[in-house]
Amino acid sequence: MADIKKNSGKNILFVCTGNTCRSPMAEGLFRKALGTRLGWTVRSAGVAASVGSKESRDTATVLEKRGVSLTSFRSQQVSRALIEQSDAIFAMTCSHLAVLEDEFPEFVHKFYLAGDFAEDGGDVPDPIGMGAKAYEEVALVLEDAFPGIIRFLEAGE
């Protein structure tokens, strides 16, 4: 029988600019990284998203290589409701973090820079217009950050 870790779960939100590249990639890869943990909700949004778009083709390709699919994914704008429902919000860059802090200052205690949990720290690079290799690099940065993010979230339970 599979070893299933039971806990109350968390509501996690990843935020980038348009919610078609970095944050949906983070959403899909983080779900995979959670493995057998039950009760976690993982979503993504953008600070300047065009609502209803699918993830970018390069994002889908990177996810498919890792056995991840976002079949029902559609981009969405970050909103007060999403922020309120989330236990932790991970921004892809310092500028995304600044937008969140400016628009939702009462929730600053929920905001983190995703890249700070990776070995090299800092912003998760923007792959738009940079080709498939740049998208692969984003995936590697995110995958490096996820163990630290999971430890951080589980320590706060």
Image (cartoon, helix red, strand yellow):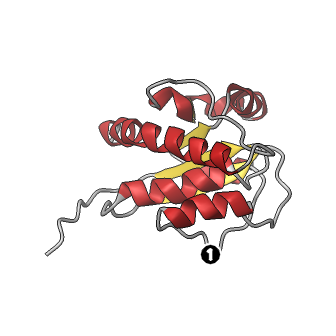
Using the rendered image of the protein, determine whether residue 104 is visible from the camera's viewpoint: yes
Residue 133 lies, with reference to residue 114, above or below; the image says below
User: Residue 69's spot in the image, x, y percent?
Assistant: 56, 70
- Viewport quadrant of the C terminus: top left
Residue to which mark 1 is pinned: 71
Viewer-proximal residue among 20 and 76: 20
**Quadrant of the frame with the N terminus:** bottom left
Q: Residue at x 66, y 57 (%)?
A: 59
* Quarter residue 128 falls in: top right
Which is nearer the eye, 94 or 88? 94
Residue at the extreme left: 1
- 145 relative to 7 in the view: left or right: right
Q: Is residue 111 placed above or below 67 in the rendered structure?
A: above
Q: Residue at x 76, y 43 (%)?
A: 130
> Is residue 83 among what the camera can see?
no
Residue positioned 30% across, 63% down in the render: 36
Q: Residue at x 44, y 38 (%)?
A: 144
Q: Which one is in front, 124 or 57?
A: 57
